[in-house]
Structure formats: structure tokens, C-alpha cells
Image (tube, grey):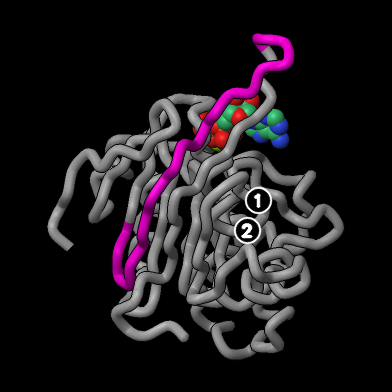
Amino acid sequence: MITNSSPLLIASKVSKTIDDNTQKNQRAQILNAIDFEAHPNETIAILGRSGSGKSTLLNILAGIVDADEGEVHFYGHKLHELNNKQKTLVRRNHLGYVFQFFNLVPTLTVEENIFLPLELLGKKETNRLQVEQYISELGLSSLRKRFPNQLSGGEQQRVAILRAISHQPQIILADEPTGSLDVDTGNQVADLLFNSVNETSTLIVVTHSEEIAARANSIYELSRGKLHKRIANSL
Ligand SMILES: Nc1ncnc2c1ncn2[C@@H]1O[C@H](COP(=O)(O)OP(=O)(O)OP(=O)(O)O)[C@@H](O)[C@H]1O
Ligand SMILES: [Mg+2]
């Protein structure tokens, strides 16, 4: 079981190879024995060139993609020991994931998407006032009855972010969460993500923005399959 001081997420010797489309019958190693920990109250930024494996790493940390080698401990659970149903339950309870391409449920409205995690947990009323305030602050009030295909990219991104934090998860993974937003809205969203971290939770954000990265306690760069810690700001 997880205690106040134990890491919320541990990756140990995580490796992943993929088919290398540039060379026939070759495999490319995009993650090479990655070790990584995320602690309560810690915010972590991961930078890296396009194609370096950032989204793949987040998907492995979330148990959505299996590593070829290595282990991930997610909120005290050894993901490789869980079946798909168990992993889904662990994610439902403890994970908020802002996907790079949003992954909103197309048949649900804006408000249904945002409240979906709370609905699944049977806690819709618990955090309603706070979520309603976020909806208003992010300028989504007039869009709440729309479906995702009736939204701009930036509007979809804001919905995806509120969906990720509505149930106050302990582990927030955000994959380029400001990629489709103007600078002001991006900063507003970054405020929301970083402010949602507390002594029981952690945020890992993949970004191409130095400004967003500078808000994090720790900055890593993913390059040639390795995570390099770039700057160690004080916690
Ligand atoms: N399911 C897959 N099958 C084969 N190759 C894949 C798969 N998913 C990703 N890749 C490849 O793995 C590499 C890393 O992809 P990934 O999406 O993790 O990169 P990224 O760092 O998130 O890039 P970006 O900044 O563009 O989002 C890329 O070369 C990509 O083409
Ligand atoms: Mg990516």
C-alpha cells in the first residue's frame, strides 16, 4: 500500500522497441532501460524531440502500452501483475490522463465528458462545485451541450484537461496539454494542472514549451532512449 512518502509512480529498467520503418526487419529501441520515479507533491516535465518516445513512455507508465522489459509500479500496483480489468480499475481510481490527441468520447457532450470520471466512480456530486467553477473559468460554459466534433482543437483540449483532473487523481499524466492553446489560455491551463498537485498527488507533463517546463520541480529530456535529468529545481 502507498504511504505518504512512497513514490506514486516507479519505472524500473523500462525498455521498448518498435519496428523501424526506415530499415526493413530492423527494430528501433525508443526506450532503453529507463529508471524514473514520481513522488507526492512533485511536478515533472519531460521534453524531447518529436518521435523520441514521450507519448510511448506515458502510455507505458499508465499501463496502456506494455513495456518489452522492466516494471512499472503505479500507485503501489505492479502493472505487469494486473489483468486488463484490474488495470482499468486502477486507472479509473488514480489516474488523470490528458491525451495528446484528447480522446474525448465522441458520443458524450462536453459536460458528460468532463464528469465521466466522477460518474464512473459514483462520486458525481463530490467535486461538482469545483468542476463547475473550472468549466466557467476555462470559458466552456456555453459549450457544455456540444459534442467533441463541434469543438475547436483548443476547446477539446480544455475539456480533456478538466476530464483529467475532475476526480482529483493522484497521478496526472499530461501529453502536450497546451499544444493547441494560445499563450494566455495555455498559461491558464498550466496553472490549473500545476495547482491541482498536492501532497497526495503528482503531475508528469510532456511539453515542447520551455515556459511550461520551467514550472516543474524536475525537468527531464528524453533522447536516444534515455531520460536525462536536466535541471533540478528545489522541491
Ligand atoms: N504503435 C506503434 N507502432 C509502431 N511505431 C510506433 C507506435 N507508436 C509510436 N511509434 C513510433 O515510436 C516513436 C515514438 O513515438 P511517440 O509517439 O512516443 O513520440 P513522441 O516523443 O511522443 O513524439 P511527438 O512529440 O511527435 O508527440 C516514433 O518513431 C513513432 O513513429
Ligand atoms: Mg507524443
The residue under label 1 is 66
The answer to whether one can see residue 181 in this image is no
- Give the percent coordinates (x, y) of residue 51: 54, 26
Q: CA distance from mark 2 to mark 1?
A: 6 Å
Q: Amino acid type of disc 1?
A: Asp
Q: Amino acid at mark 2?
A: Gly
Horizontal relation, residue 32 to residue 150: left or right: left
Spot the residue most to the right. Answer: 107
Give how far across and how far down residue 21 sits, in percent.
69, 15
**Disc 2 to disc 1: CB gap under 8 Å:** yes
Q: Is residue 169 visible?
A: yes
Residue 162, relative to residue 59: is it above or below? below
As drawn, 64 above or below 92? above
The residue nearer to you, when weighing 130 against 216, is: 216
Q: Residue furthest left?
A: 234
Q: Residue at x 65, y 41 (%)?
A: 101
Secondary element at image label 2: loop
Task: Measuring from the top left, give residue 74's x and y in whole percent.
Answer: 52, 68
Q: Residue at x 36, y 39 (%)?
A: 227
Q: Which residues are magenta?
A: 22-43
Q: Residues within 10 Å of mark 1 (few under 14, many from 20)?
A: many
Q: Residue at x 30, y 64 (%)?
A: 42
Locate residue 49 relative to residue 233 in the image: left or right.
right
- Provide the residue designation for mark 2: 63
| Residue nearest the viewer, comparing 114 with 141 | 114
Front residue of this view, candidates 141 and 86: 86
Query: Picture coordinates of residue 45 (x, y %)?
Result: 35, 47
